Amino acid sequence: MSALGQPTAQLLAFPGQDASRRSALTLALKHHRLPEQLREALLRETSAIGPCGIDEALTRVLAMRMRFAPIDLSRSKRIFLIGPSGAGRSCVAAKLVHAAARAGHNHLVVIDTKGFNPHNLRARAAFGCMGARPDAQTIGVISALSDAEEISETIAAFHLDHLIVTGLDMARRHGALTAAVTQGARLAHVTRSPDADAPLETLSARELANLLLN
């Protein structure tokens, strides 16, 4: 079980009270500064869930949106890490190498590519085609401290199909995390510490719901 799990806040449960549930969820999502379009989509989708607590409704909606693809270090031979400057690629590279060595998989090669400016058209062209490389697994590295409004644009522009989200130890709002993991890209892992020996964790829909509601 991931270390991110927290007890669900039952005080935010409003069984059978759709208006109250929507109001409480609106406040929570605004607090975490989700992009407006994503916030309205989540509100609309949770309103279609039958009578239940706000935590259960949000968990169900997130579960329908999130896709998972943890890295199998026993099969991976070469991994390209791409991401905006400052996203934490070097820390992720160190974690992958450390985890692979600890598991006895010394064949893994991790390539930390140069960071890019999401607004640079040349960078988009250069990095956008890397996801199609047949000789390596390409993982996008996104920081939970990023601007949530720009996350979807960055993922789409650079064709990031697999993600590792960093900086959960520093993030106090989870709009960027939610934007990263709910709009099509497959989540490999999240990180809560920059230390090389700290684990690459998984994140479930319920854990993300707890982060948004607590």
Image: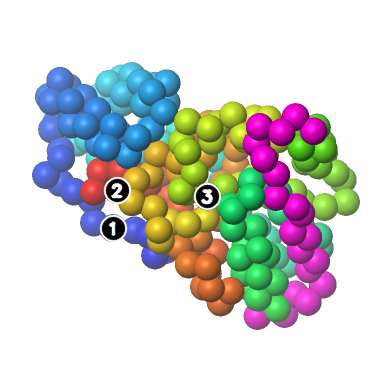
Magenta region, residue range:
102-122
Q: Is residue 110 left or right of residue 13?
A: right
Residue 26: which quarter of the image?
top left
Exactly how many numbered labels are in the figure? Answer: 3
Q: Horizontal and vertical percent for residue 94? A: 65, 70
Q: Nearer the viewer, mark 3 or mark 1?
A: 3
Main secondary structure of the magenta stretch = loop
Contact flag, marks 1 and 2 (Cβ < 8 Å): yes
Q: Secondary structure at mark 2?
A: helix
**Which residue matches tag 3?**
143
Nearest the viewer among 212 and 134 is 212
Q: Which of the two discs, 3 and 1, labels the residue nearer the N terminus?
A: 1
Q: CA distance from mark 1 to mark 2?
A: 6 Å
Q: Which of the two discs, 1 and 2, labels the residue nearer the N terminus?
A: 1
Q: Amino acid at mark 1?
A: Gln
Q: Is residue 214 left or right of residue 42?
A: left
Q: Secondary structure at mark 1?
A: loop
Tag of residue 212 = none
**Which residue matches tag 2?**
210
Q: Residue at x 49, y 44 (%)?
A: 146
Q: Horizontal and vertical percent for residue 4? A: 38, 59
Q: Amino acid at mark 3?
A: Ser
**Which residue matches tag 1?**
6
Q: Residue at x 48, y 67 (%)?
A: 193
Q: Is residue 32 left or right of residue 137?
A: left
